Image (cartoon, rainbow, N blue to C red):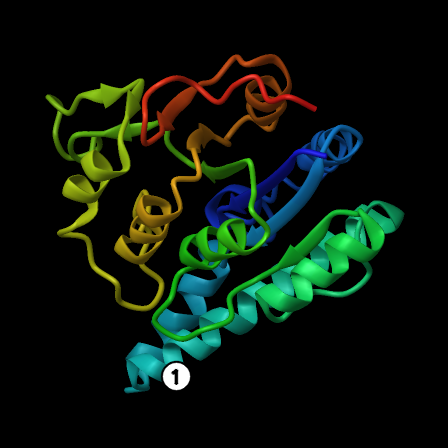
Amino acid sequence: MTRVVLSLGGSILFPTLEENRLAGYLPVLRRLAEKMQVYIVVGGGGEARRYIGVARQAGVDEATCDEIGIRVTRLNALLLVSALGDSAFPAVAESQTEAMAAGVSTGKIVVMGGITPAQTTDAVAAVLAERVRADLLVNVTSIDGIYSADPKKDPDAIRFESMTADDLMQIVSGDSLCAGSNTVMDMVAVKVVQRSGIPMVVVDGREPGNLAAALLEGRLKGTVVIRDGGNPLPLKT
């Protein structure tokens, strides 16, 4: 069966608790799970950044801020697991090894959050994709692809339909890795994508249907990152 790892950005699923997209994503994730083995790594989103902001104001060190962020990602993951019900493995995996075992033993959707200070959930997802020998890594984020620069700051930024992992590394190499950072993807994650050769797509997740359209129909609103050219969509299921 096709194996897919989703890095589901907290800014997509839980920008705030009040403005969450949980209801919109549940049927999409269940539909995907009918066709493929799905692993999900959930980010912290706006709530994590709020907690981290308060901690910084109180003089808390960055390592502890990372720990706070990890706990929020796991709380978000638990909420998603609970909402998915029987479609998901009933516990939040706390390591890639636990996630692998849960996927193999049940075939259900497996969900996890952050695990390591100074490592984003994108990096966790990239390593998980490598460990489970995923056919595809999907970064579900709040922009419609990868740009040459921040499109919110640079009106001349160019959006890429496709690129290599080496190209992506050039773009992200200057990004910050402080606790709660919110970039297209961090350097550690890109390095794992480079070494593994696993194809990746960046999907505009602000509309949940974009994810199903990309993975099941090959209609991608985003960017393909692949080492040797070509396009991994639609997937073979």
Q: Quadrant of residue 171?
A: top left
From the viewer's perspective, is 63 left or right of 128?
left
- The residue wearing badge 1 is 64
Vertical placement of 37 versus 96: above or below?
above
Mark count: 1
- Disc 1 is placed on an element classified as helix
Residue 144 visible in the displayed image = no
Residue 85 visible in the displayed image = yes
Residue 66: where, in percent of width, then height?
A: 39, 75
Foreground residue among 203 and 142: 203
Vertical placement of 56 versus 34: above or below?
below
Vertical placement of 98 versus 207: above or below?
below
Q: Quadrant of the N terminus?
A: top right
- Seen at 32% across and 26% down, the residue is 228
Vertical placement of 126 versus 69: above or below?
above
- Seen at 56% across and 47% down, the residue is 133
Residue 196: where, in percent of width, then height?
A: 40, 47
Q: Residue furthest right?
A: 86
Foreground residue among 11 and 77: 77
From the viewer's perspective, is 180 left or right of 3?
left
Residue 48: where, in percent of width, then height?
A: 46, 64
Foreground residue among 124 and 228: 228
- Seen at 16% across and 30% down, the residue is 148
From the viewer's perspective, is 147 left or right of 193?
left
Q: Which amino acid does the dot numbered 1 rest on?
A: Thr
Q: Quadrant of the C terminus?
A: top right
- Seen at 13% across and 52% down, the residue is 174
Neighbours of disc 1 within 10 Å: few (<14), some (14-19), many (20+)? some
Residue 88: where, in percent of width, then height?
A: 80, 50
